[in-house]
Image (cartoon, rainbow, N blue to C red):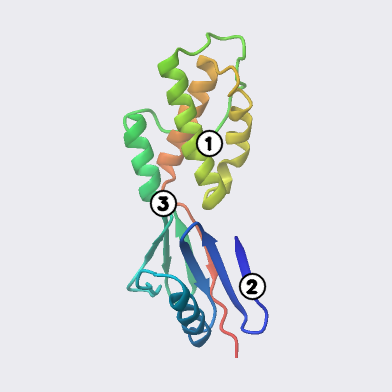
Amino acid sequence: CVFLHPDRDIVVCLYVDDCLIDGDEDDIKWFLEKINKRFKCKDEEWLSAESPLDYLGMEVTMDTDHIYVCMEQYINNMIEMLDLGKRRKASTPITAPIDATSRVLTTVERKRFMTALGCVGWLVNTARPDVAYACSRIAQHMANPTISALEAAEKMCCYLRDTASFALAVPIWECD
């Protein structure tokens, strides 16, 4: 959920029990004081150029001009889990059509396919919208996945491996 406090111009992104708060420091401290009175909370962490944050697997960093969201470590963990480290490079997330008439996956292969799509689904919804189309096209085969669909999912994961350092960048706006 995303909440906006219109009078204080503070934005709170809430996912279960994790908050990401954007606003002026005084307003953030006001919010933290209110929530800490009501709930037992962990100590807050503050984003700075010297102190990046991990928010739900998203690496949030900043420099003097931008705030970045990257999923490099998550992608590296996914590649290790799926044992795709030594596959050939992939410069695009999807190229060939998926052959729905190819061999149906075994139970083990089907689990691998579902795991890959689940991991990529999280990436699509966080910091890697560049693979949304590929993920959607491949996910159309979830009801009856074939070896062609698994190969496409693995290629998409290899593309993510080869572009793991890609990040979303948002300019830092100084308001007077």
Q: Secondary structure at mark 2?
A: strand
Residue depicted at 54% across the width and 21% down the height: 149
Earlier along the polypeptide chain: callout 2 or callout 3?
2
Quadrant containing the C terminus in the rendered view: bottom right
- Residue under pointer 2: 4
Ranked by sequence position, the earlier of labels 1 and 2 is 2
Q: 144 above or below 131?
A: above
Label 1 Cα neighbours within 10 Å, binned few <14 / some 14-19 / many ≥20: some
Q: Do we see residue 84 in this rendering?
A: no
Which residue is disc 1 drawn over? Answer: 92
- x, y (%) of residue 26? 49, 87
Distance between mark 2 and mark 3 Cα atoms: 30 Å
Residue that numbered label 3 is attached to: 165
State the SS at label 3. loop
What amino acid is at disc 1?
Thr
Residue at 44 percent across and 70 percent down: it is: 39
Between disc 1 and disc 2, the foreground one is 2
Residue 111: x percent and y percent? Answer: 44, 23
Task: Single out the mark in the foreground, 3 or 1.
Answer: 3
